[in-house]
Amino acid sequence: MRPMVLTAVLATLGTPSARAAEGKPVRLYVSTRAQEALPEADSKAREKEFDAGRKRAEQAAKALDKALEAKHGKNSKDWPEEARRQSEDAWQKALRADLARATAKFDKDLGNIAKSLTNSLKDEVKKSKGVALSESADQAELAVELLARSARTSFPAAAWMLYLKVTPVGAAAAAATGDTQFAQVKAKRLGVGLLAAQYVRGAVATVHPYTEAEPYWIIRVYQQGTSYGDVVRSAADVLAALGSGLAEPEDKPGP
């Protein structure tokens, strides 16, 4: 995937770093999505179908980028706005297809991964005054739903991925339609289109932006490493950066 720039982490949540200075950290609550257990044959057929869809979407996005590069040059920053938008839309479709493939399989260990993510966030809370953990979804301002996980274990390019849905809830959701602390959620998406940002642990977070039609973010955290523990810790970094507004992303290639 070609590199893009994360442009608006700092402002999208109504300047949470300023909230932190006032002693009001952004509260997060982690849960898992509801899963449907299917007969093994049906499950494998669905996985195969969605995996084929993922491959088609990624191939289409790559082919489009290649055509746009031939027409407008290799540096996407110099492309016309319409060309960039076409590419972003294609990669959004690829991300959606990848998520569909990842969620096609019933994962009995998803709850354990969510617990590990919560524990990693506890470490982040100790380091940042901008975020805190909530004991319930009702008291949270950002609901973090673990949608799926996946892995590519072929050596030497083993990679681990988590798929998260982050939704403003409670006071944050109400404020998103008003002119209070989270109003900028409505006014400013998390950057423009699909975004890739290099974070401190070397992970890449790919983001489907918040919009009025889809008032949440879908985030895929990609990490090369040796186990799911690596990507869990990276996901905690990404969520803390999103919540606290303290991210300092770099313009580097994604996976």
Image (cartoon, rainbow, N blue to C red):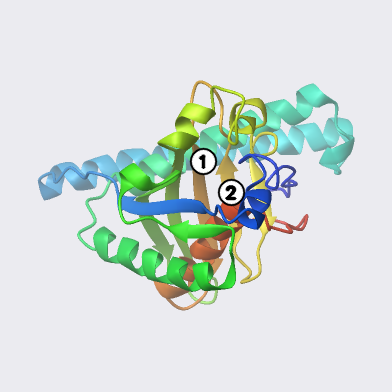
Name the foreground residue: 210 vs 206. Answer: 210
Q: Are marks 2 and 1 in contact (CB under 8 Å)?
A: yes
Q: Secondary structure at mark 2?
A: strand
C-alpha separation, residue under disc 2 versus residue under disc 1: 8 Å
Name the foreground residue: 97 vs 124. Answer: 124
Q: How many marks?
A: 2
In the image, residue 202 sits, relative to residue 143, either above or below, namely below
Observer able to see residue 40: yes
Mark sitting on residue 206: 2
Does residue 184 appear left or right of residue 104 in this picture?
A: right
Of the image marks 2 and 1, the number of the one nearer the N terminus: 1
Q: Residues within 10 Å of mark 1 (few under 14, many from 20)?
A: many
Mark sitting on residue 196: none
Q: Residue at left 61%, top 58%?
A: 204
Q: Secondary structure at mark 1?
A: helix
Q: Nearer the viewer, mark 2 or mark 1?
A: 2
Q: Residue at left 73%, top 57%?
A: 249
Name the foreground residue: 57 vs 182. Answer: 182
Observer able to see residue 154: no
Tell me the kind of residue under disc 1: Leu
Tell me the kind of residue under disc 2: Thr
Question: Which corner quadrant holds the C terminus?
Answer: bottom right
Mark sitting on residue 95: 1
Q: Residues within 10 Å of mark 2 (few under 14, many from 20)?
A: many
In the image, residue 51 sits, relative to residue 188, either above or below, namely below
User: Percent x, y for residue 73?
Assistant: 88, 38
User: Percent x, y for residue 127?
Assistant: 58, 72
User: Percent x, y for residue 48?
Assistant: 31, 44
User: Percent x, y for residue 236?
Assistant: 50, 63
Q: Residue at left 66%, top 44%?
A: 195
Q: Residue 63's quadrant in the figure?
A: top right
Q: Residue 200's quadrant in the figure?
A: bottom right
